[in-house]
Image (cartoon, rainbow, N blue to C red):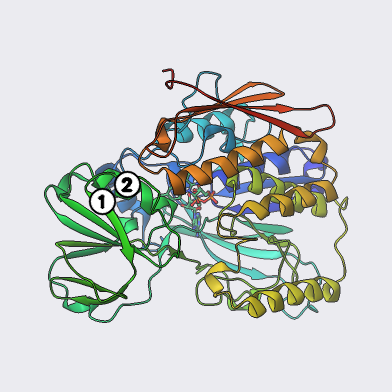
Amino acid sequence: MGSNYLNKKKVCIVGGGQSGLVSLKRILESPFLTGTIIEQKDNIGGLWYYNGIKEFSASSRNMGKTLPDPENTTSMYDNLSCNGSYTLMEFLDYKYEEDVETYLAQSKVFEYMQGYAKHFNLWPNIQLNTSVVDIRPENPSAPEGEPGKWIVETHNLKTDTFSTEIYDAVMICVGKNSYPYQSPIEGQDTFQGKIFHTKYYKNSKDFKGKQIVLIGFGPSSADVLLQLSKTAEKVTACHRFPYGYQFGLLPENCRETKTVKLITKDGVVTEDDEVIPCDVIVLCTGYGLKFPFLNESCGVTVIKEKYVPHLYNLTIFTKKPTLAFLNLCYRSAEFIVVEIQARYFVSYLEGKTKLPSYEEMEAVLQAEEAEKVKKGLPYSLWFQIGDFFGIESWAHFWKLAEEIGIMGEYKGAPALEKIYGLLIGRLCGALAVYKQDKVKKINDNTWEIIMAASPLGKAERIVLTLNPDNTLTSTTEEVTEVAE
Ligand SMILES: Cc1cc2nc3c(=O)[nH]c(=O)nc-3n(C[C@H](O)[C@H](O)[C@H](O)COP(=O)(O)OP(=O)(O)OC[C@H]3O[C@@H](n4cnc5c(N)ncnc54)[C@H](O)[C@@H]3O)c2cc1C
């Protein structure tokens, strides 16, 4: 290690999922920075590192008491296939092979991340089996807005030893799908059947012939419904969206209805006073944000487990801007978003991107928050840009990419955005068939989307062509069947 290494700023990356990996890659390509991923599990991949519940529990038994999830399980489950097409699940300069399936299996995304780490030689800077247990500023009394160093304490779960290191910056890449979130429903304790959060759903085999109620119905629980529909007698999705999936062509033994106001010993009662008897209730109520390793002196607060104030551009902690959080916003193409966030923070650490003053950043955030209050949005929607589907989040992150001078690298941006919009429409409008759709990047300027037929319409072939001025032309034609 030469003196060059000693002069580089050191960045601690907490978590080795997709956010952590892309952060490390972007840090290591900077001549001014170096960094290390600290990952508590025995492999990288985050949520996508999953070998089935048995193997996972066995390997995580060694992981000591510092695991933030006391039940030592991941939110992944057997046979998950992604709910976004592969074109939305890859980083800028590492692509899936050409003949990859549209909706990737969990194992394929895991393999992609392994390939990414190997291709960019990230492994020497990854420390596995190590949990970050405490992070605190070196100078807790520094004025707000002043960048400073961080003291990071880690627990090596194999050797059961603790150590402390000082870093110039910290990136929190621990995801947002670890801590089940639910406001208890009246009568919940009286239910005599099985009740559990989606985090603990692993496969549908134990639900043969059961009457199941899902409480909540986001994109992930829609996938759980599809799996359960194959073994359960009946699945009822109870949700509060005024629209929902009515046109969603649910499988024959599934239906949707209003949200639940009461749980009884043998079922649920909806807001419309419909009584639904059931054997199983699955709480599809999402996840909460927790950062148990952040010392109080960091000044980070989490409101109602859903919102972290003082994050400029949803990333940089204004009070101490050498601290960044990745991937906290909802309903977005996460691979694309986290790469832009990582590059934004790197650009700031390198001194290329200047932040506004602390007061200016706070004023921007306060105005944004006032707008959310005015709209009456609950905190659960404060990390969501724009409408329910997140379409507007694209504009926000393209603007950020523009600001740091990398937008030119996102040549296919209008097509990716369009594909995202089309897919969201299918997820909400053709749930039972949308995974038969095919999305393919034909070349740098052309994408083809074949939408499977549904009772609402015939199969369609959409071709997206990127024009030289970066606008998009879209043509649609009916096709008779979806080619295999
Ligand atoms: C069931 C399900 C299905 C999904 N499907 C899709 C999909 O199809 N497409 C899509 O784009 N998104 C999907 N998502 C969204 C998901 O958030 C992301 O795909 C992705 O997992 C986020 O990556 P991440 O790196 O931010 O976090 P994670 O993948 O959660 O990784 C965080 C890592 O941090 C580590 N960590 C946590 N605390 C510590 C600590 N104290 N010390 C050290 N390490 C720590 C964890 O062990 C973990 O490895 C899905 C989410 C769920 C729950």
Q: Which residue is mark 2?
A: 250
Q: Where residue 43 appears, x then y in whole percent?
A: 45, 41
Who's the residue at 21% across and 78% down the image?
Answer: 189
Residue 143 relative to residue 11: left or right: right
* Residue type highlighted by circle 1: Cys
For the C terminus, the quadrant is top left
Q: Is residue 71 visible in this depiction of the protein?
A: no
Q: Where residue 426 appears, x then y in whole percent?
A: 48, 42
Query: Residue 281 lies in what quarter of the image?
Result: bottom left
Q: Secondary structure at mark 1?
A: strand
Count of all numbered marks drawn on residues in the image: 2
Q: Is residue 436 visible in this depiction of the protein?
A: yes
Residue 163 relative to residue 157: left or right: right
Residue density around tag 1, few if under 14, some if 14–19, many if 20 or more, within 10 Å: some
Query: Residue 215 lies in what quarter of the image?
Result: bottom left
Q: Where residue 376 appears, x then y in whole percent?
A: 59, 78
Q: Which mark is residue 92?
A: none
**333 or 18: nearer the viewer:** 333
Q: Secondary structure at mark 2?
A: loop
* Residue type highlighted by circle 2: Leu
Is the CB atom of the residue marked by disc 1 within 8 angstroms of ligand 1's nearest atom? no
The answer to whether mark 2 and mark 1 are in CB contact below 8 A is yes
Distance, label 2 to label 1, CA atoms, is 6 Å
Q: Which residue is mark 1?
A: 254
For the N terminus, the quadrant is top right
Q: Where residue 271 appears, x then y in whole percent?
A: 32, 76
Who's the residue at 38% across and 65% down the image?
Answer: 285
**403 or 275: nearer the viewer:** 275
Who's the residue at 35% across and 41% down the image?
Answer: 432
Residue density around tag 2, few if under 14, some if 14–19, many if 20 or more, within 10 Å: many
Who's the residue at 59% across and 44% down the image?
Answer: 421
